[in-house]
Amino acid sequence: MADGATDPRTIYLKDYTPFPWVIDGVDLTFALAPRGTRVTSRIRFRPDPDAPPGPFFLHGEDLRLIEARIDGQPVTPTVTPEGLTCDVPTGPFTWEAVVENDPELNTRLEGLYLSKGMYCTQCEAEGFRRITYYPDRPDVMAVFTVRIESDLPVLLSNGNPEESGPGFATWHDPWPKPAYLFALVAGDLVALHDSFTTRSGRHVDLGLWVRPGDEGKCAWGMESLKASMRWDEEAYGREYDLDVFNIVAVDDFNMGAMENKGLNIFNSSAILASPDTATDADYERVERIVAHEYFHNWTGNRITCRDWFQLSLKEGLTVFRDQQFTGDMRGHGVKRIGDAVLLRGRQFREDNGPLAHPVRPESFVEINNFYTVTIYEKGAEVIGMLKRLVGDDGYRRALDLYFDRHDGQAATVEDWLKVFEDATGRDLAQFKLWYSQAGTPRVKVEESWEDGRYRLDMTQTIPPTPGQPDKQPMVIPVALGLLNPNGDEVLPTTVLELTGGQQSFTFDNLSARPVPSILRGFSAPVILERDAPEGEAAFLLAHDTDQFNRWEAAQTLARRAIRARLDGQAIDASWVPSLAAALRDDALAPADRAALLGLPSEEETAQALWDDKRIPDPTAIHHAHEAVRDHLAQGLRDLLPQLHDGGRMPGPYSPDAKSVGRRSLGNAALRLLSRTDDGVRAAAQFAEAADMTQSVAALGALLAVGRGEEQLRAFHDRWAQDRLVLDKWFSLQVGLARPEAAVALAQRLTQHPDFDWKNPNRFRAVLGALASNPAGFHDASGAGYRLLADWLIRLDGANPLSAARMSTAFDSWRRLDVDRQALIQSELGRIQAAPGLSRDLSEMVGRMIG
Ligand code: PHE
Ligand code: ZN
């Protein structure tokens, strides 16, 4: 990071040193109470023969130390706000401590806290130090035994249950783990129980624990869990390794979910689903996150990270694995398109702004600020490229070696790359730059055709990013196909390896000048720069065999239409007919056709303008997008009703891929249709809707055209008691509000009796939705900036982690016009000057101001 050098709290990768002791066992006893929970710890330390000696330091924050002993003798450690040091024997010794903490006062949702009467923990990355004194670092792995004392009926922790009786339960986790994977839950909970038999015959009891009232929303999470367990056995040969696997839903949670060993804790929005309360997108998200957390059992838990700089070692890999899983469940084409949309909308933005950082950062102030789209999504892309370069078999061999060699260890990116080198014989020195260089590479492609020889000249450039002015060329796999002018494929997908700054690729013996299909399957997370000849995109939309690039061709056409509108020019007359032809093509699955109807996001348009050295105006961009949607709605007028009708399905709701695809095409059509039919169809669909997918789609279609007041009221009344649906009520209206109305609406909703700002989901449903409505948020008055800054300052006092995450809404400020820049700069300055600002938020603001 740019600013790291000036912040005295900065931690550097290069400063890594191992912990001087090994832990032979940890016993914890919790006497739970809203205030004054007593944690008694007994930790057996032994000097690590392989580590240089050093001081005995245990992390600990916001704890009251009641007593400490070494080998039974009372000691008086030196305590600071960060932890304690103590004189210790030179040989092995047992450390015992009694501390107190106050779950009821914990609004940070890190460490041990209370959510609606339920005790729960969140320890990644550095939350365990808020529970007791401990070497809270991922390379210290130990076997934990936990005793929980409480009158609450359900008492859960990691590993396998041992004893339990009135008022207590004990758990033992045989697998050594770092403290960040510790978890404890206690509450008045009910469970959906099921079981799974691993392929070697281990019987596993599965439990999905929720608060009474949510029992009816557990089935899909459980199905997803069993599917994930099966998939990891089949695709990676990875079996589950305990007798029980528990998932708990909690309403107050900063992130999506957490992979604690044997006891995954989920934000209730990422696990609960029923047809009448969850949309197709929610079902997919539950399936994906359940898989992600489950897959961590091997990639993260059995093999963990040496230090937090290696975070992408577990997160990039686990995202890659969940992407493969979702592809297998729901189709690889649509999945890839969705991932590319996310990457371009969010990761490219991060990578090209003040918060840009490498997949493996070299410094940080607050690790919580590095759970980013770069670590997760770009990290997954890097693994996808690696797999493309070494092939499926090479990938499988490398992964087998990784699990073999590093099981039980805290590994590094070097270890990871070494297994690929050893398993495939490939030198990955240059490839490693993907982990150390930030910024999205640009690949410029020029072509020539002479005497039956076709040549592609490629140039790569990687823009400067904070702290990294100069870059070296990287290894970029460019998947290419060539088509004949008649549409036949003459070169099936071939991976070109672009390794130089400039490189040419030639293709001989072609009978006619081919049409190239470049970067098939989005084979690398790069921006392709190319002046494609007139008509090429329409040709590829009609003929490309690569699903991704067919969609990309439709995007190219849409981008051109948006540009034309922005520049006051006419939209190419061939666009709508070529799109209509694809939409009529019954050989294309409905889900693929639905994707073709999606326009690039306003954020993407802003980035593209900025790349062209133009200053993007969020308001103008919004109006151009709207105009293009109107144009499309007019042009597809005859086709849309039948597409919409195709999304209506008789019978009970099912979240299977085929049904989801049909509904998504139907609802994409409805969204456009509502621009020309006064919202008649959407209103009818809302009135008849039998499930949340149809209901939200109809409401969204109405809101997007400035209607739906009445339906919004009905929706609130119907769902006033369901917090997850109510989140949708908040976010839909803010996200779809007209630019001039969005800020006032968001402001009004923060006064709504149901606005519970301490609940991260609800906060995000209003303020996050505002940030996701660019024209509204960037209102030229600056009112959006002021509103968000006010709330970030307030939230920071209670929950710094969430406040810092949400502050990224400001990270695009430098590409705006000078007036907006000045407005944002003054809000950032106001945040920075707020008394008692957290380390989390101050790091973010410091990096954004630069
Ligand atoms: N490790 C979690 C995941 O990726 C994310 C997380 C990070 C959750 C930090 C909570 C706190 O699944
Ligand atoms: Zn993860």
Image (spheres, grey):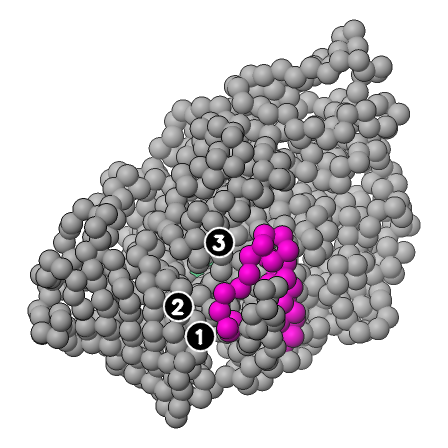
Q: Which residue is mark 2?
A: 174
Q: Residue at x 70, y 57 (%)?
A: 329
Identified by mark 1, the residue type is Asn
Q: Which residue is mark 3?
A: 299
Give the mark toward the camera: 1 or 3.
1
Residue 801 lies, in percent from the top left, at 38, 59
Q: Classify mark 1: helix, strand or loop.
A: strand
Distance (Cα) linking label 1 and label 3: 20 Å
Chain-order first, disc 1 or disc 3: 1
Give the mark toward the camera: 3 or 2.
2
Residue 485, placed above or below residue 117? above
User: Mark 2 and mark 3 in contact (Cβ < 8 Å)?
Assistant: no
Q: Which residue is mark 1?
A: 160
| Residue toward you, 575 or 15 | 15
Report crowding for label 3: few under 14, some 14 to 19, many 20 or more residues within 10 A (C-alpha).
many
Identified by mark 2, the residue type is Pro
Q: Is residue 238 left or right of residue 17?
A: right
Q: Is residue 241 magenta?
A: yes
Residue 694 visible, this angle: yes
Residue 671 lies, in percent from the top left, at 76, 56
Q: Residue at x 71, y 55 (%)?
A: 330
Residue 57 lies, in percent from the top left, at 18, 58
Report crowding for label 2: few under 14, some 14 to 19, many 20 or more residues within 10 A (C-alpha).
some
| Residue toward you, 682 or 459 | 459
User: Mark 3 and mark 1 in contact (Cβ < 8 Å)?
Assistant: no
